[in-house]
Amino acid sequence: MGTESRYRFYVVDDDPIYTERMRRFLEAAGHAVTTANSSRQAMEEILNRPPDCLLLDVMMPEVDGLQMLKQLRNNSDFDSVTIVMVSGKAYEFDRQRARSFGADGYVTKPIASPDIVEKLTRILEDRIMLSFWGVHGTLPVPGPKTVRYGGNTSCVSMAFSKGPFFIFDAGSGIKALSDHILSTYSSPFRATLFITHPHWDHINALPFFAPLYMQGNEFEMCGPAHGDIDIKSLLSAQMDGVYFPIKIKEFASTLKFRDLGEETLEMDGVRIRTLLLNHPGTCLGYRVEYKGRSLCYVTDNELYPPETDFFNEHYRDRLVRFVEKADVLITDTTYTDEEYPAKIHWGHSCVSQVADLAARASVGTLYLFHHDPDHSDDTVDQKLETAQKLLRSWNSETACVAPHEGLEVRI
Ligand SMILES: [Zn+2]
Ligand SMILES: [Zn+2]
């Protein structure tokens, strides 16, 4: 671990067994640790020298953790200090209360494994966990030809360490995300689902997203209306009792729906911008911005090559501006260049046009996405090689990746 990622932790808990255990875990990972078993003593010390991260037990004699949190959040010297509450109480009421007092995180005891260090570092660094659950387009294609990248259709998630959880599209990849949430997150779980458009490969595994059936969970589903058909009707129509035996009103979680056009939204400190894409029907691309980082999810989309009659410079430039300098661009790379002439007007892009967009917009990393159902892992490898060669030949600093199902990237 480099010195730049070493942090100063201060651990306050009246239980000396717990403070010593935390010291052991944190020091083993190279961090500096001070501990205190008295909240009064701790208060004096930290006021003199604020740490990078303060771990506060909620229930302590003398001054309890929440009182300390409240006092420290009224002191501007502590604006940049990450404060994490630690408690044996896992109740949502207590979590919410801690958040409302300004806690950056809330972890529950018992803390028995060094995995806690990773969790605390995530809260401290405030990273976004980007995860890929389905990278193919059009049709799920499981089988021997897609074992490396996976054969599921579009689904990506972004988990923010301070709370918000965003899901992009509900293709068949959302089943693995559903399993992940059930095994990792405690109830109640909240998330926002952003749908690009209602083609099957982007919505039809929604009924298999188990957290929707759980009471107490809350979801907001956002996406573009199609004329006078709103996003609620678009998503419900596939669950009409005939095409799927359970109706959307039988979801036990609390659901909200929001129709989106081209606009800018703010959700829990995260900014989301949308752009209409070149695809049959109404399809939205998303740009997510948080504390100097930006991630774009732009699928499905057809980039006409400049040598075709349909090339539209105005649209190309709007799109370049939309994805400009993004750290992450996840975008429709359905075809190879050789296949594209036979697929013009199908609403999808070929690899050279996608590389061109990423280079023009100086994006950090281009993620090739929404592969054609006839593409094997080897074809995806070829597209990756083509994109990387082109980017190198243009002296572009944009990196290029073909993500596989299960890939997690911290941004
Ligand atoms: Zn699609
Ligand atoms: Zn589509």
Image (cartoon, rainbow, N blue to C red):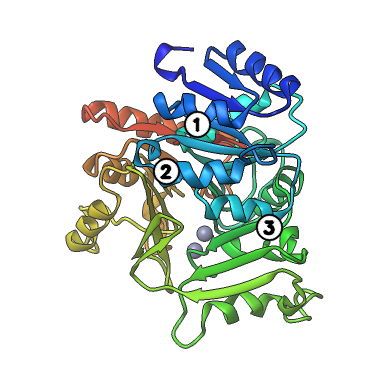
Q: Nearer the viewer, mark 2 or mark 3?
A: 3
Residue type pointed to by label 1: Asp
Q: Residues within 10 Å of mark 1 (few under 14, many from 20)?
A: some
288 horizontally vs 139: left or right: left
| Residue ID for mark 3 | 93
Residue type pointed to by label 2: Thr
* Percent x, y of residue 230: 51, 82
> In the drawing, what numbered circle is on residue 336?
2
- The quadrant holding residue 50 is top left
* Percent x, y of residue 279: 40, 66
- The foreground one among 8 and 287 is 8
* Percent x, y of residue 347: 41, 62
Whether residue 134 is visible:
no
Earlier-in-chain disc, 2 versus 3:
3
Residue 277's place in the image compared with 173, above or below, is below
Q: CA distance from mark 1 to mark 3?
A: 49 Å
Whether residue 223 is visible:
yes
- The foreground one among 381 and 315 is 315
- Looking at this rendering, what residue extends furthest in the bottom direction? 228
Which element is circle 3 on? helix
Residue type pointed to by label 3: Phe
Asked if labels 3 and 1 touch by Cβ distance under 8 angstroms, the answer is no
Q: Nearer the viewer, mark 1 or mark 3?
A: 3
134 horizontally vs 410: left or right: right
- The foreground one among 12 and 110 is 12
| Residue ID for mark 1 | 381
> In the drawing, what numbered circle is on residue 2?
none
Q: Residues within 10 Å of mark 3 (few under 14, many from 20)?
A: few
Q: Assign the C terminus to one quadrant of the image.
A: top left
